[in-house]
Amino acid sequence: MLPDIPIEPESKVMHTKINVEDPDGFYAKLIELHEGLSVDESLKVNAKLILMMANEIGDRSTLDEMLAYLRDESRK
Amino acid sequence: MSAKYAGFGQARGVGRQARKTHPFVEPPELRSGETRHCPVLIVGGGPIGLATAIDLDRHVFPTIVLEKHDSVSDGSRAICWAKRTLEILDRLGSGERMLEKGVTWNVGKVYFGDQSDPIYTFDLLLDKAQKFPAFINLQQYYAEEFLVDLLADHEGIDMRWQNEVIAVDNDPDQVTVTVKTPAGNYRLSCDYLIAADGHRSPVRSILGLSFEGRVFEDHFLIADVRMKADFPAERRFWFDPPFNPGQTSLLHKQADDVWRIDFQMGWDIDKEAALDEKSIDARIRAFIGEAIDFDYEWVSLYTFQCRRMKNFVHKRVIFVGDSAHLVSPFGARGANGGIQDVDNLVWKLALILENKAPAGFLHSYDEERIYGADENILNSSRSTDFMTPKSEVSKAFRNATLELARDFEFARHFVNSGRLSVPCTLDLSTLNEPDTEDFSAKQRPGSPCLDAPVTCDGIERWFLNLLGDRFTGILFADASGSITEDMRTLEDQDIPVHTLVVKPAGCAAANGDIIDQQAHLQAHCDARPGTYYLIRPDQHVAARWRSFDIAKVNQALSRATGHSN
């Protein structure tokens, strides 16, 4: 187990409830974005998307919480 | 939901009870040689054709139904009947029988991998206190037989079994068909021909018309088996289960201990081997274990199409149901979409035949039901894309979604095992009178009326059963409110509007007044004393106002019947 990331009391917390409008529509657009791309190209598109979304979220504690979850989960 | 398209599908009837066959009766035109003319001919005696005939007869238009087979559907086929379909069938007379015989369910569960708890559970009945549940499951042949039984009360319907349409002349002033029977051929003509002849519509082929849209590269095996099992009456869906690794499966309970098990198979398969009895046995055993005995009711291997005709109305030929549009079955949007076609079409056609609406009014059927079909096709395509990812990255997103759904509520909204049929709200229809006053969106123009328990003349009733199948006005009144002289005038018009008065609990009621005992109607309609709703014959809202004004009602009526826009 990794240690819990300390969260400042005033900082934001990751959304675990749905926060995206029209989830089916967004998912379809996300898949459409990758249409016709090679796996390498898709990897790069995903990387760009993650960086753009991270910048949009901004808040480090939220981003760190996500990273901690994924580090923990992907090594289970 | 229906298993389609498969040239290689098969029906195996080990456990199946034979359906009643209907003898061939020689049509009088065969002997007389005359070409009889009738207002409407219906091609196809499936659920859609039968419902169309019954609805037209309620509007006092006689029909001839031409069905090439001698009995109803040979397999379970469509099994999931949605609440709106049951409400429409209730208007036609078979809704309560469907409910009684069918297996009621409101809850769906989605499983992933070998985990025994669902990753996601959904309740499809959002508005409680409804006459009908979100869904019942019932074999298509029962739905058809219940409609066939209703024909005895409809003398205007001439049901002709073993009558196959082999030629169609679609002229500007009438349609003429040639009908093949075991005793020879004859001809009929009509003002309008309704093609309810299914996904491989012979009428569509004869007229050289085609479908546009997508065919999905995947195979699914339906095994409808008869067995005594105590699985719950829920829609259960699995992604990557141990008994069908890397694929999906679906389980539905039907009447008479019949269960539908649906196995995703993949695209590159040996179809003959897939339909080999031993291999199907092995699949079912892997799922249900060794302890339960089972018999086959119906087996079919199929691929998906999400397609529709560019237009459903071609001069005097009108396509309804699967002949007009096809969807993948995950969403139960096939037969349910077809019944909504019927509901939308018949009152319009009746007004045209009575010369109370212009012939061009038929265009609104095209407009409204193409909108409905596109909604069904969009939802079914998205579900199929999620279940059958077309690329590595798409598969990675799908699996990531499923894994995240174990831990996070948000990801469950992206999991798509089928977005189940909901009644279509005709938001963009030119028949709607746009709101000019402040109302909640729930029962906005274009939406189908929600049911509610009410009392009328001291008897507990369901609201939708009081609407009938003509234009209705709903006046929300306080204790002193009642029908006005202007509302009585509306009753005697060329296209009459019958006004019902709705009052809150505790009010003194005149004959026929509706008491909204639990205030559900008031809440659904965001009503205040004086609020007036204009409801179409198909129970969709045409217009609404905070106060009654006969000029405004007639303007909305004119718009809703194709006289102005």
Image (cartoon, grey):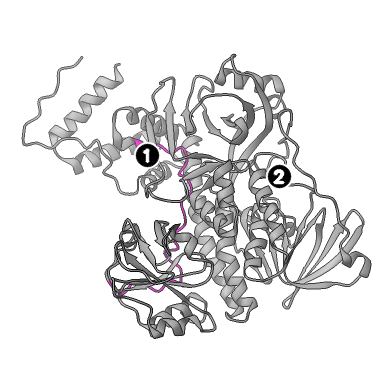
Question: Nearer the observer, disc 2 or disc 1?
Answer: 2
Q: CA distance from mark 2 to mark 1?
A: 36 Å
Tell me where residue B222 appears, x and y as whole percent.
62, 33
Whether the residues at callouts 2 and 1 have beta carbons within 8 Å, the answer is: no
**Tag 2's secondary structure?**
loop
Residue B334 seen in the current view: no
**Callout 2 and callout 1 share a chain:** yes
Q: Is residue B499 visible?
A: yes
- What span is in magenta? B412-437
- The crowd level at tag 2 (other Cα within 10 Å; few <14, some 14-19, many 20+) is many
The answer to which quarter of the image holds residue B211 is bottom right
Residue in the image at 79% along x and 52% along y? B68
Side of B325 relative to B451 (left or right): right
Side (left or right) of B453 relative to B324 = left
Q: Which of the image's four quarters has the N terminus of chain B?
A: top right
Element carrying mark 1: loop
Earlier in the chain: of badge 2 and badge 1, it is: 2
Task: Decide: is B407 above or below B29.
Answer: above
Q: Position of residue A70 (x, y in %)?
A: 26, 25
Residue at the disc numbered 1 = B414
Q: What's the amino acid at mark 1?
A: Phe
Mark 1 closeness class: few <14, some 14–19, many ≥20 residues within 10 Å = many
Type of the residue with mark 2: Ser
- Chain of the residue on which disc 1 is drawn: B
Instruction: Tell me if residue B425 is in the magenta stretch.
Output: yes
Q: Position of residue B92 (x, y in %)?
A: 59, 59
Name the side, left or right, on which B18 lies relative to B562. right
Left or right relative to B144: residue A76: left
Closer-to-camera residue (B379/A2): B379
Residue annotated with mark 2: B73
